[in-house]
Image (cartoon, rainbow, N blue to C red):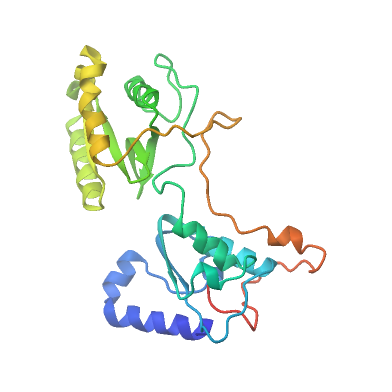
Amino acid sequence: MRQGAQTRLVQDLVDLRIDMPARERHNILVGTPEEFQGDQRDVILLSMVVDGANVIAATGRSHERRFNVAASRARDQMWLFHSMTVDQLSSKDLRRSLLTYMQSPPPPYTHARQPANVTPDQRCAPFDSLFEQRVYLRIKERGYDVVPQWEVNGKRIDLVVTGGHGRLAVECDRSPHHSTRQQIQDDAERERELRRAGWTFWRVRSSAFALSPEDALAPLWKRLTDLGIHPDTTSDTSADGTEPLAVWAPVGLAEAEAEEEEADPYDGELDDDSEAV
């Protein structure tokens, strides 16, 4: 199925199944990769459905740019729909590269930047308090991946512990005397909204942690195990003090073909023999 036909089909389905107020509220857009350049979405649905009788390999610099745009627009989730299997695609085909990655990805709930060189007694970004830093350090000591101030839909979670099968939001509750009534209400509403979006929360109070960090965090280790979140024993720390996240990158076609192709600034146009991404 050609790009234009796919786009029209999906747009017709969206128009038929989703009413206009919902489309506007969720800012739903159907289009080709070039239409998403400079844009980001919480969820991306990416189609690699092609006519099996007319399969042309997706190789070359223009395809590489197109795939980079298509596969990097999602903040939270990317769903890939495909009509071919890995063994039906050439080793140089970008669709094979992306499909292989999607079938065997790194842990899905990891994060690109986990700060290192954090101390328990000196405030550092991006933490809101020394209490958060101390909880962070205790969790890291156990070998878990944990990210401070994780942003979701314009809201922030104190700490998020991540693993291959899920993630857990950890909220560090300071003394109520240090918060206004409005701050407490805003915090409760933020958590309710994030729970509706599928987040699971676990809370620790500063008073309990100050009395006994071991006892205060003991239920956390069980909760993480119950969720299938386990310590990471393989992560490395990069030169800038942060722990890297493996992300998909297209097979290195541009370098291999640099001498065979003239530079072609990405104009977003599909080649005549290309199908939609």
Q: How many marks?
A: 0
Of all residues shown, which one is farthest toward the right?
A: 259
Taking 166 as reference, is 184 left or right? left
Q: Note whether 17 is above or below 139 in the view shown.
A: below
Taking 118 as reference, is 191 left or right? left
On the image, the x and y values in percent for residue 200 come to 24, 43
Taking 57 as reference, is 146 left or right? left
Residue sitting at 26 percent across and 46 percent down?
199
Q: Note whether 13 is above or below 191 in the view shown.
A: below
Residue sitting at 22 percent across and 35 percent down?
223
Query: Foreground residue, 92 or 210?
Result: 92
On the image, the x and y values in percent for residue 107 come to 42, 46
On the image, the x and y values in percent for residue 116 come to 49, 26
Query: Foreground residue, 96 or 38?
Result: 96
On the image, the x and y values in percent for residue 77 come to 39, 57
**Res 143 quadrant in image:** top left
Query: Foreground residue, 11 or 177?
Result: 11
Residue 112: tell me if it is visible: yes
**Res 65 quadrant in image:** bottom right
Residue sitting at 52 percent across and 64 percent down?
70
Of all residues shown, which one is farthest toward the front?
A: 87
Taking 16 as reference, is 207 left or right? left
Residue 71: tell me if it is visible: no
Residue sitting at 32 percent across and 23 percent down?
135
Q: Note whether 107 is above or below 52 in the view shown.
A: above
